[in-house]
Image (cartoon, grey):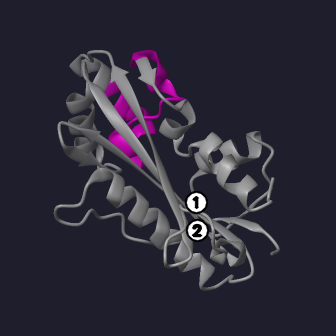
Amino acid sequence: MKDLVLASASPRRQDLLRNAGIPFVVQPTDIPEIPRVGESPRACAERLAGEKAFAVFRERPEDLILGADTIVVIDDEMLGKPRDAKDAARMLRLLAGKTHQVTTGVCLVGPSALRTGNRHLTTGGGDIRSETTLVTMQPLTEDDVRAYVATGEPMDKAGAYAIQGIASRWISRIEGDYFNVVGLPVPLVCRMLRERGML
């Protein structure tokens, strides 16, 4: 096995891996992030993470591929990345003053993932898991929403906010892994890599 390959163009995921001292290369994928009818948030996040990882693995079968997908859920509605500024404002109004769920699916696939004896391995050869964090956002005024959307920060983020950015001022509580909300559950990924002898 040669490299750990991150199947994502997300600068936040790249920063998290880099800050954790994990060497990697990047090869993004173009997988449509669309939930299936009746699919749970966890199942959707895990499926999309797997699709991203396997798409790159087909091109790099000697490497270990890391795919991830993050979904925000509020009142049983799954929020991906906003389509436009109006959609971002809609999402922020939904989240304001409430507790929501952030789930990130993670998939590792590679030559060593084909071994037996790990109960997390799927029949397809990928190790797919997920992490969920609860996040409470303070109430927002319409001025808050308009000003935040105008910064552009919400536009490529699931749920239309970045917990590590300007939106940090409104996050009053989290239960679970902070890094998961940023976009990658680092402790979970490290455990998965250690099981493969990569750390």
Question: What residue is drawn where x is 29% and y is 64%?
Answer: 34
Label 2 sits on residue: 28
First along the sequence among labels 1 and 2: 1
Q: Quadrant of residue 132?
A: top left
**Residue 156 is inside the magenta segment:** yes
Quarter holding the N terminus is: bottom right
Report x, y in % for residue 78: 25, 48
Determine which of the numbered discs, if any, sits on residue 198 in the image: none
Q: Tags 1 and 2 in contact by the CB under 8 Å rule? A: yes
Question: What residue is drawn where x is 59% and y is 77%?
Answer: 56
Secondary structure type for disc 2: loop
Label 1 sits on residue: 9
**Residue 199 is inside the magenta segment:** no
- Taking the image as shown, residue 4 lies to the left or right of residue 39, namely right
Instruction: Name the residue nearer the viewer: 174 or 145.
Output: 174
Instruction: Name the residue nearer the viewer: 180 or 94.
Output: 180
- Taking the image as shown, residue 17 lies to the left or right of residue 90, namely right
Bounds of the magenta span? 146-172
Question: What residue is drawn where x is 40% and y is 35%?
Answer: 161
As shown in the figure, which amino acid type bears the numbered disc 1? Ala
